[in-house]
Amino acid sequence: MLFRMKNLNLFFFLIIFVSLLPTSNGFVQAYTRWNLPPGAIARLGKGNINEVKYSPDGRTIAVASSIGIWLYDAHTGAELALITGHTRNVYCVAFSLDGQILASGSRDNTIRLWDRQTRKRKATLVGHTRPVRAIAFSPDGNTLASTSEDNTVRLWNLRIRTLKKTLTGHTDMGRSVAFSPDGKILASGSDDGTIQMWDTETGQSLQVLTDHNRNVTSIAFSPDGQSLVSGCDDGTVGVWDVRSGKLRQHLTGHTAYTVSVAFSPDGETIVSASWDNAIHLWNPDTGERLRELREHTAPVVSVAFSPHGETLVSGSQDGTIRLWDTQTGAAKNTVDGHTSDVKTVAFSPDGKTLASGNTRNTIHLWDTETCVRVTTLVGHDGVVYAVAFSPDGGTIVSGSWDHTIRLWDPETGQHKQTLSEHWDDVVALAYSPDGDRFASGSHDGTVRLWDPKTGTELEVLQGHTGDVRAVAFSPDGKKLASGDGNDNKIRLWDGHDGEHILTLVGHQRDVTGLAFSPDGSTLASASDDRTVGLWDVDTGQNLQNLRLLKGHTTYVLTVAFSPDGKTFVSAGRDMMIRLWDPETGIPKSGFVGHTGYVQSVAYAPDGRTLASGSTDGTVLLWDMTQFQSKTD
């Protein structure tokens, strides 16, 4: 026995050793390099969690996320695979009863079928005209049901992989579908506040359950098929008699949206998850709340029982997947690494750290060599829209939806100071090159200059007529640029005393991003008018023959110059990162890889890496040297 234990320990040591073998970027975690788009070298974060499901054999947990489908070992929590192929957020996932096929529904309006073992795509089901919100396999595995934001429910023949029936009757988007255990009834829940019961053979409506007053977010049949449980965004849970359609229990206790419900395999327990960060276990017959599980620190978006009912899995917007013992309520394991929408990214001056601000009110600091999250800065009470490092790297400044600016020590993660003079969201920040001041832009219509050492407000720059969504200092610190979200103008100010110098006119909609060229002669701008501008900062003239650069198909949200000034980058809601020649205004090429809007880009100080942050919850690191070698 001892010999076997020693060999087993050696086996696990070898696995760990191999997983830590260095790559060209250092000791990079393996999963940060899985299924990367062309040109990318690493992915920081695993994206938002949308739904969690157990495989029928209980060995695997599938997570529908904003970047694809993550597969985890249900016992250890280890990453097994990342399945990608959808071009947008994956909202839902389901295993066939034999566990061999995995289905996924996405914001790209498609359903994809995957081979669980090979993780290769078997088929794509096309028909929905809006995002697919929920899917379910029939018990015999021959039919897949889906519902969508197009208000329809669809039944797909999986043998020939074609649409079998389209069920209409809901007057608002679909949220959930579930087959009865015998496969004869399909239930669907909708934002119209109803649950429709359908005959799966004929597609005819059997009855409509109407006792919910708001959106029906989730439904599930009991194992015996006699009961149906539903979650509603009024925070309640309903238990229905399937035969009569009558509401038997109306369970209250959640204080926010109930978004996910499920029956245990023995039918003796109901679980519900809510935006109040809590999970409740209920007796379906008496309506008694049996237990509350409360360790998540953000809304719980999905729950599921293991096949034998001994474990419960939950996914939350706090970025964790938690496994619970259903008998004791004790937490058995936690899987972390999932992340929420990235609003802003910034490199430290030495390029070793990347800061990302997100919609979960926090700032993540990442080691750019190992791709490991070093620490998380917690303190803001709202979305973090902007982050910036001081030139010496000793301070991080952040701006938030909570109207405050916070200063942090990046080494210790300690909060230094809070500045509260803005009376609306702080969405833009920039340090002066000498580090003696920084600028903030806010939805209150002002630009403010601050002394970072004392926290003193030095100047309030007024003149904008709407939101200030972008600020940038020139490389010599003599000029400060700011962009307006109302009159669509760019204003140039004296970087020291705040005196107005010049107004740049040309954009037709909000100015969303600004960046100076390394020599300070040119200013690049991004706008909601779908264009990118290049401006002579001395004359105020728009360069490139007095025209704005077109190429993006929707709002442009961010711009950045390479450190050598030979390239500038723009990105936005079309998910395309475009590289331009600033001399000619001609696009060089670009990158596609995010499944959500690209909201921020930043070059590493040496220019070799570009970071992009997206609403898909991840930061992608792009190899700019490889790109240059192919195009120069």
Image (cartoon, rainbow, N blue to C red):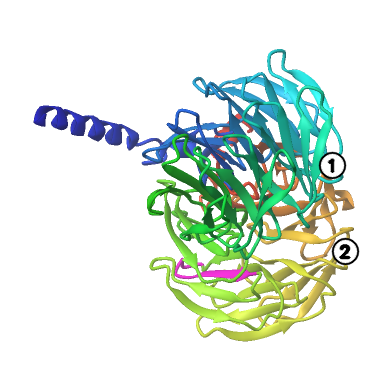
Q: Quadrant of the C terminus?
A: top right
Q: Decide if residue 163 is in sight here.
A: yes
Quadrant showing the N terminus: top left
| Residue 149 drawn at (x, y percent) | 79, 42
Relative height, residue 587 to residue 296 (above, below): above
Residue holding disc 1 = 170
Local secondary structure at mark 1: loop
Whether 92 is among the magenta residues is no
Residue 552 in view (yes/no):
no
Q: Residue 481 vs residue 53: left or right?
A: right
Amino acid type, label 2: Val
* Amino acid type shown at disc 1: His
Q: Residues within 10 Å of mark 1 (few under 14, many from 20)?
A: many
Query: Foreground: 230 or 233?
Result: 230
Q: Residue at x 74, y 42 (%)?
A: 244
Residue 284 location, x and y as percent? 57, 50
Residue 297 x, y percent position in the rendering: 51, 61
Instruction: Look at the image and give the residue range highlighted in magenta.
Output: 391-400
Per the image, the residue denoted by label 2 is 505
